[in-house]
Image (spheres, grey):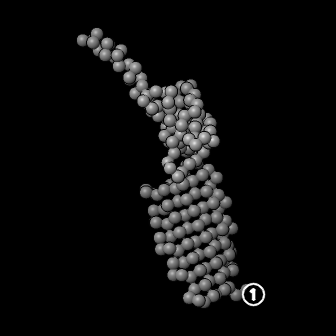
Amino acid sequence: MSDLLLVIEKLTAPLRRRVLLMISKALLTNTNDAPGQQTVQVKALADELIDGAERYQPYGLTSHAEPGAECLLLAVGGHRSHPVIAVIDDRRHRPRGLSQGEVQLYAKFGQRVHLRDDGAVEIAGGGGGRIEIRPSGAIDLVAAAGNFVKLRDDGAVEIRSANGQSWIEVRNDCIEMDDPK
């Protein structure tokens, strides 16, 4: 019986190797963003350097990851000669602390689009300015310095300086302002 097992192992060894090599973690070393299909160079396994692996991205969304990002490499049909990259993630820049169900599009430079669990959408620039669109329809525009414009859900518009000393409010065809002294 052991002779039969040895024969089976010997016959299935190539298939076993191909299955084991179908999915690997890899480390991004370079990206070519010029062609229609982005290609990357990655380090996988011990010292395996794979160049020209096609990177698949969702339609309408693209990115150019930095070297050192982590990849999921798929060897189509178990052949390492036709690798594709299914996912690239970079834990160095990924935002943390999201609530369950939230989504955030981000870049390492601080820009983000955050679909929050309260139904609001927050768009932030890398310099600190942001736009918040609330489920009620109200919209806040906040500059990095703290000045803001509020388009309130009751139809009023409020404009305030960062220190709160200067303000204008427009509602029901009425304009109120601070009293400059």
* Left or right of 51, for residue 13: left
Residue closest to the eye, 62 or 137: 62
* Left or right of 64, for residue 119: left
Q: Residue 123: horizontal and vertical position, in percent?
A: 57, 62
Residue closest to the eye, 73 or 147: 73
Q: Residue 136: horizontal and vertical position, in percent?
A: 47, 74
Quarter holding the N terminus is: top left
Residue that sits furthest to the right in the current view: 181
Q: Residue 152: horizontal and vertical position, in percent?
A: 54, 78
Q: Residue at x 52, y 52 (%)?
A: 60
Q: Which residue is mark 1?
A: 181
| Occupied quadrant, residue 92 | top right
What is the crowding at mark 1: few (fewer than 14 residues within 10 Å), some, or many (at least 20)? few
Q: Is residue 68 visible?
A: no
Residue that sits furthest to the front in the current view: 36
Residue that sits furthest to the left in the current view: 1
The answer to whether residue 136 is above or below residue 125 is below
The amino acid pointed to by label 1 is Lys
Q: Residue 175: horizontal and vertical position, in percent?
A: 63, 88
Q: Residue at x 66, y 86 (%)?
A: 177
Quarter holding the C terminus is: bottom right
| Occupied quadrant, residue 130 | bottom right
SS of the residue under disc 1: loop
Q: Residue at x 61, y 70 (%)?
A: 141
The answer to whether residue 87 is above or below residue 149 is above
